[in-house]
Amino acid sequence: MGNRLFVGNISFRATPEIIREEFTAFGEVSDVHLPMDRETGRMRGFAFVTMGTDAAAQAAIAGMNGKPIEGRPLVVNEARPAPAGGGDRPPRGPGGGGGFRGPRSGGGGGGGGYGGGGGGGNRY
């Protein structure tokens, strides 16, 4: 097990200091990261807490999961590694991306229009 924890269901009123203070009861807290929404500038409602040891992380999961802070019960579990490529978007499929469509196919084309072949003789 790692010592980095995912902490969900955090009140928007919570601060890194409040989170650190609560988790310190279970051991040394190395880091508290509360991601912010790029568009609104508000906290996203979850955090990552890095405990000093695996034992402290296990104790924090047992002691903090379900504990209310600022009126909301926390969800605490081991953090999973971020997916390759990062960001908020799912990974692209094969072929990458770019443009809306692939290259146009099927050559130029035939009849109608101004001066296009198509027989028919004189219209007038």
Image (tube, rainbow, N blue to C red):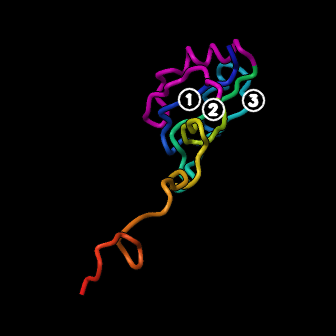
Residue 56: say if magenta. Answer: yes
Q: Is residue 47 above or below residue 41?
A: above
Q: Residues within 10 Å of mark 2 (few under 14, many from 20)?
A: many
Q: Is residue 60 above or below residue 90?
A: above
Q: Which residue is mark 2?
A: 48
Which quarter of the rendering shows the N terminus?
top right
Counting residues from the start of the chain, the first of labels 1 and 2 encountered is: 1
Q: The residue tagged with tag 2: helix, strand or loop?
A: strand
Q: Which residue is mark 1?
A: 7
Residue 58, horizontal then vertical, whole percent? 63, 13
Q: The residue tagged with tag 3: helix, strand or loop?
A: strand
Q: Residues within 10 Å of mark 1 (few under 14, many from 20)?
A: many
Residue 17, horizontal then vertical, whole percent? 64, 39
What span is in magenta?
53-81
Kindly report which numbered mark, 2 or 3, lies closer to the viewer in this rendering.
2
Looking at the rendered structure, the kind of residue marked 3 is Ser
Displayed quadrant of residue 27: top right
**Distance from Cα at disc 1 to Cα at disc 3:** 15 Å
Image side of residue 12 versus residue 110, left or right: right
Q: Which residue is mark 3?
A: 30
Residue 46, horizontal then vertical, whole percent? 54, 36
Looking at the rendered structure, the kind of residue marked 2 is Phe
Image side of residue 2 versus residue 99, left or right: right
Q: Are marks 1 and 2 in contact (CB under 8 Å)?
A: yes
Residue 74: say if magenta. Answer: yes
Displayed quadrant of residue 82: top right
Q: Is residue 5 above or below residue 112?
A: above
Work out whether residue 98 or residue 49 is closer to the camera in this orientation and state it.
Answer: 98
Give me the residue at 33% from left, 72% from top: 119
Q: Are marks 1 and 3 in contact (CB under 8 Å)?
A: no
